[in-house]
Amino acid sequence: MAHKRYTDPDPAIDAKVAELLSGMSLEEKIGQMTQRGMAPGMTDKHSPVTKGALGSTLGVFDTAKINEMQRRAVEESRLGIPLIVGNDVIHGYRTIFPIPLGEACSWDLDLIERTARMAAEEASAAGTDWIFAPMVDIARDGRWGRIAEGSGEDPVLDCAIARARVRGYQSEGLASGKRIVACPKHFVAYGAAESGKDYNTVDLSENLLRDVYLPPFLAALEEGAGSIMSAFNDINGVPASANSFTLRTILREEWDWSGVVLSDAHAVGELIDHGVAADYEDAACQAVTAGVDIDMGSAAYPDHLAAAVRAGKVSETLIDEAAGRVLRLKLMLGLFEQATVDESLTARLLGCREHRTLAREAAVKSMVLLKNDRDALPIKPAGKTIAVIGPLADHRRAPLGCWHCDGRPDDVTTILEGIRAAAADKARIIHIAGCGLGDDEHDGFDDAIHAASDADVAIVVVGEDADMSGEAQCRAYLGLPGVQEDLVEAVAATGTPTVAVLLTGRPLAIPTVAEDVDALLVAWHPGVEAGTAAADLLFGKANPSGKLAVTFPRAVGQIPIYYAHRSTGRPAHGEGTEDWNKPYKSRYRDEWNSPLFPFGFGLSYSAFVYDALQILTPAVRPDGTLRVRVDVTNAGDVTGDEIVQVYVRDVVASLTRPVKELKAFQRVTIAPGETRELTFEIPAASLGFTNARMQYVVEPGRFEVQVGPSSAEGLVGSFQVVE
Ligand code: NOJ
């Protein structure tokens, strides 16, 4: 039988919630609104669990302890209400898949749904009920460390991925017999942190909020996500976890959504640090009034809310609504029927071969080939000497990336191991680190130069360690840490064809590296199958197909840099520094306007040719469908996957509009010599924007369409939206 969605109406569940609430004390209701992590004594007989003072947990991974807590909650608390066990399962539980930003570069929604489902399988087998993901924050600033956790800069791609992840996490029929609830986060605009600094203030127009930052949340909720997490940041001066405009007006009234709102960790108490609450009681009152159902970890609710209700500062109706939503979720999750898990399942499921096979596919599809001169790739290993250089070549932790949950360095196939396994019987492999990740000395360079000089090809593996991106890991400089750029330069200067493999959690500003090397493969933090996947691509067993979900800048000074920027009154032409771009254009004196690598860009070992663009609907009504067709031919000699992208520009509108916006894409496999005729059907309703009166409108007039392999190139046509 198909599962009900968490927010579907269900009179029987509503009646059960009302019955439960009617028998609960105020403290017990507030207990349901309280979440905390493992603390000493949590599994004891006299813990908050048995007192009914806790509704859910975070950061508790030990399956035996989870079962113990659930048993106590069900058997020893007065009302026998189970806990919801919530955890950060961001890109896999034990089997670590590529970081979400990497996986987004696959543009493969089916793959993304499958990895999310497998993460849910493992998490649920280990006792987790609630996954604090997907992170759907749009991010256009590589300084912000959490860019690693999202799907990049574009709302249309992010919406599609948000839906795929929610479907995957909330899949039916998980082996544990339990269900998982997803938690899109962080509501909202967390990724717009000023200067790319985590937790920083956000000041943005309501238009941008509505057109760019909110849509991925709505997509996730429409797909059935049963909860949402309110963010740390403020928005135009109002902290997101006390923001009745976003949490009530938009979420409850405009979107008519009835799921659970969970604060981010300590965000309720941090209303004091924001300077909008005088003390914890004030913070609790503001958060619950704004619409935060659960206080994650700050203790403002459990310690102060009951007194506030008794003093008449908060109505008990609000408490009933919030606690009722939590109870409803527990009932929908089936926790009253099954709260514990079979502890033997983890041994069979976690990190099993089938999951690793998927991790390899995901890593292959996530990696993006950004440069390939002199046909440096793929490498034909027979009879060659291959120098594998760089501090990350044999690194076991970096490939796991941030938030790697129960992922273990010992499970990782390093890049060197992958290369050896794929080529050691055909080629001679030499390995030299050359320098450490954060070294400022060039001591090991001579050995690296020597090895490269003796080799037919050098593979330099450089980048960031696992903990250099993710929460609070912001960077003001976006080059390679330490002396790694010097190492790449020294290796390339030997004249030996040089391939850089970049392990990173963010788009880096590495123009010199990109210039120095013959080939550049961005592997992101690819997970446990890092080495196998990289070797598949380096030696041509697989064909690169990833395309950037985020722009790579040339310089930090260009940030924020994203393809969908608005038109200005003084646009610069081309790259921005051509001679004929006279001063007083929108450009830099000392850097091009163009990025190092644009959104949507990625190379293949195939050569795709675009032809015969046709706009099948030259005039479309606002409620009609734009239809566009194009031929894509694989003129290369290997089968490859191409991600065909459609961008639209609203040429004249009542407000300035982005110079182009992604509206559709297809990932297709094309054999050598084959031509695929592709048709895109785009609802004209998706071509609108929020106007000056905060209404979503599709305005009549001329639009341009670009169909091509990236945001920067393609065939161009036009159509009219007509009344
Ligand atoms: C803080 C992070 O912002 C959030 O993403 C995470 O889910 C919580 N901590 C819980 O670990």
Image: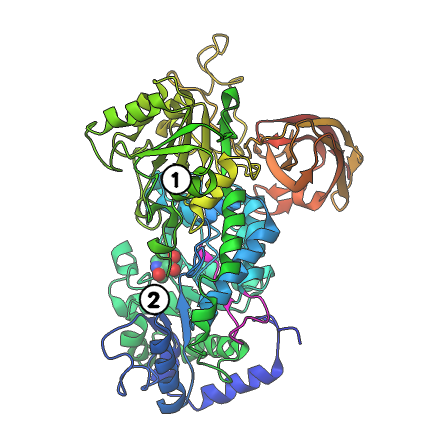
In the rendered structure, the answer to whether residue 77 lies left or right of residue 280 reads: right
- 185 in magenta: yes
| Residue closest to the eye, 269 or 417 | 417
| Magenta residue span | 170-187
Q: Is mark 2 within 8 Å of ligand 1?
A: yes
Q: Is residue 18 magenta?
A: no
Q: Which residue is mark 2?
A: 59
The answer to whether 3 appears left or right of 124 in the picture is right
Is residue 211 visible in the rendered image? The answer is no
On screen, residue 341 versus residue 254, left or right, reads left
- Residue that sits furthest to the top in the current view: 579
Q: Amino acid at mark 1?
A: Leu
Q: Classify residue 511 by image quadrant.
A: top left
- Helix, strand or loop at disc 2? loop
Amino acid type, label 2:
Gly
Residue on which disc 1 sits: 503
Q: CA distance from mark 1 to mark 2?
A: 27 Å
The residue at label 1 has a CB less than 8 Å from ligand 1: no
Q: Which mark is residue 190?
A: none
Residue 27, given in percent of the width and then of the height, sits at 34, 83
Label 1 Cα neighbours within 10 Å, binned few <14 / some 14-19 / many ≥20: many
